[in-house]
Amino acid sequence: MRKILILLLTVGLVGNPAAYELPDLGDSSAAVFSSQDEKALGREIMMEIRADRDYFDDPETVDFLNSVGNRLLAVSEDATGMQFEFFVVQDPSLNAFAMPGGYIGVHTGLMVAAENESELASVLAHEISHVTQHHIARMIEAQSKNMPLTFAAMAAALLAARSNPNASVGAMMGAQAGMIQAELDFTRENEREADRLGIQRLIKSGYDPRAMSTFFSKLQRYGRFYEGTAPAYLKTHPLTTERLAEIQNRLQGLPYKQVQDRPDFQLIRARISALTGGSQAALRSFEQQKLDVKNPDDLPHVYGLAVAQWRARQLDAAAKTMASLEAVTAPNALFYSLDAQIKHDAGDAPGALALYRAGLNHYPDQRALNYGYIQALIDSNRDQEALDFIAKRIAFNNRDYHWYQMQSMAYAHLNEQLLSHQALAESYIKQGNLQAAMDQLQIAIKSGDGDFYQKSSVESRIREIKTTLEAEKGGRNKGSRLTGLNAARELAARS
Ligand SMILES: [Zn+2]
């Protein structure tokens, strides 16, 4: 994450994502640091995280994590009207963190360390509470009474303190951010509240609330075992004996309930193990396990072996492993997407397309199947079909920047330069990076193709972004306490 921090300092306030979103309803009470501010700060940080090579953009893993998070949100009245996004960071350390605006990151190390779905859910349930209770906003407000902060310094300090608590913030970001690091810890009351609300979320959503106690105790034991290198999570969420006892108190008297994990939980853990670290080392570790498809406990590892073989480009072996697995298991979206990917990489485009279509019939919202299908259409020179399919997906959900990236690819393939750069610009807008979007729109205008209407559509987008960027600069010159945020707030109120 080191690269991210340095980048943040040099670019400062790059985008004003708030201007492209509808304003939040309510929450006028948070006058100093509003929900709009939280969203703008969160998206600023996410822009840097997404550009980092440790951002784990594996749609299968991300979809699974979001399905756990959404199950908790579905029963969370305090989260009504808030938007959340759960994302994955490739990092073996045990950590999870909430960013302002509902962005919750989980390290791959923590996902693998959780032994059942409820343990993973217990961490998310706790983090969701930090967001719904605006703990981060309160922390920033308390801090800014002592020292005015620039937006970029705040973003950088938050990112360092949350996602990499072992980093020396001062050295990386200069004195200002360094001085505030000490102030960026949740209070004991914050932690207690997040535990209490988290347990309620677990109960209401049908997860095992005891998992919070078992998983947090495990983290504590792990911390003692590796002396001096306590799991990163415990540094940002200090776990005292008192706090653990309080969690256990809350759990007392709850009726015992056996909670069944979905099969995908163990499959995703195996998938992460196969996709992280060196590809040969991952493959060896699965090969050494002497797996038996007749043993149900081995099945997730058989899937992991197939993923590791595919990753190591042993496509025939991967196909064979998958065939042995699918002979004894129920169909699964993860199997469809891996089978199709293997066929695609082996050069069998019609076979891959047929498998993607079959998978999408059963699992229309699985992003891996959607992305893979679009890629396979483009690779088969069926770009117009790809564009039609993307348009339908965008009509259903236009928040996902990946659709626009693939749209740009398909247009480029058709040699439609203006439309290709315009689509790429939209993907940057979805990521909150207005400057990069502006650059793409300028290229689009100069590209030399496109009709009158397409050109005027690009020009009007350029004017919109220019206005936003200028207003933002105005906010900065006014020397607002949280630089740039006032302008963001004004724009959001107008949009
Ligand atoms: Zn916490």
Image: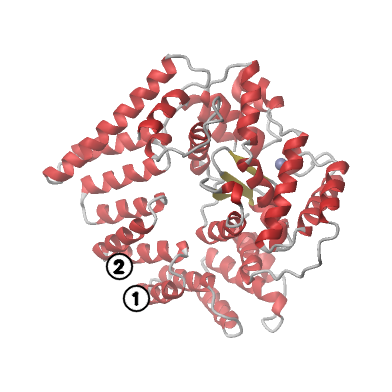
> Most extreme residue toward the top, as rendered?
478
Q: Residue at x 68, y 52 (%)?
A: 109
What is the tally of numbered marks visible in this picture? 2
Whether residue 89 is visible here, answered yes or no, is no
Task: Please state which amino acid type lies under the numbered disc 2.
Answer: Ser
Q: Do the residues labelled 1 and 2 touch (CB within 8 Å)?
A: yes
The image's colour scheme reads secondary structure
Q: Viewed as shown, does residue 447 lie left or right of 238? A: left
The local secondary structure at tag 2 comes to loop
Q: Residue at x 85, y 50 (%)?
A: 221
Judging depth in this view, the residue of 86 and 291 nearest the camera is: 86
Q: In which quarter of the image is residue 190?
A: top right
> Most extreme residue toward the left, as rendered?
452
In the image, is the residue at mark 1 within 8 Å of ligand 1 by its beta carbon? no
x, y percent for residue 399: 41, 50
x, y percent for residue 37: 50, 31
x, y percent for residue 420: 26, 48
Work out which quarter of the rendered image holds the N terminus and state it: top right
* Residue 350's disc number: 1
Q: Which residue is drawn at 61% across and 84% down?
A: 328
Q: How far apart are marks 1 and 2 (CA)?
A: 8 Å
**Mark 1: few/some/many CA within 10 Å (<14, 14-19, 20+):** some
Q: Quadrant of residue 258?
A: bottom right
* Residue 380's disc number: 2
**Mark 2: few/some/many CA within 10 Å (<14, 14-19, 20+):** few
x, y percent for residue 478: 43, 14
**Displayed-image quarter of ligand 1:** top right
User: Earlier along the polypeptide chain: callout 1 or callout 2?
Assistant: 1
Q: Is residue 388 above or below residue 298?
A: above
Judging depth in this view, the residue of 189 and 65 nearest the camera is: 189
Q: Viewed as shown, does residue 332 lie left or right of 123? A: left
Q: Is residue 364 above or below residue 325?
A: above
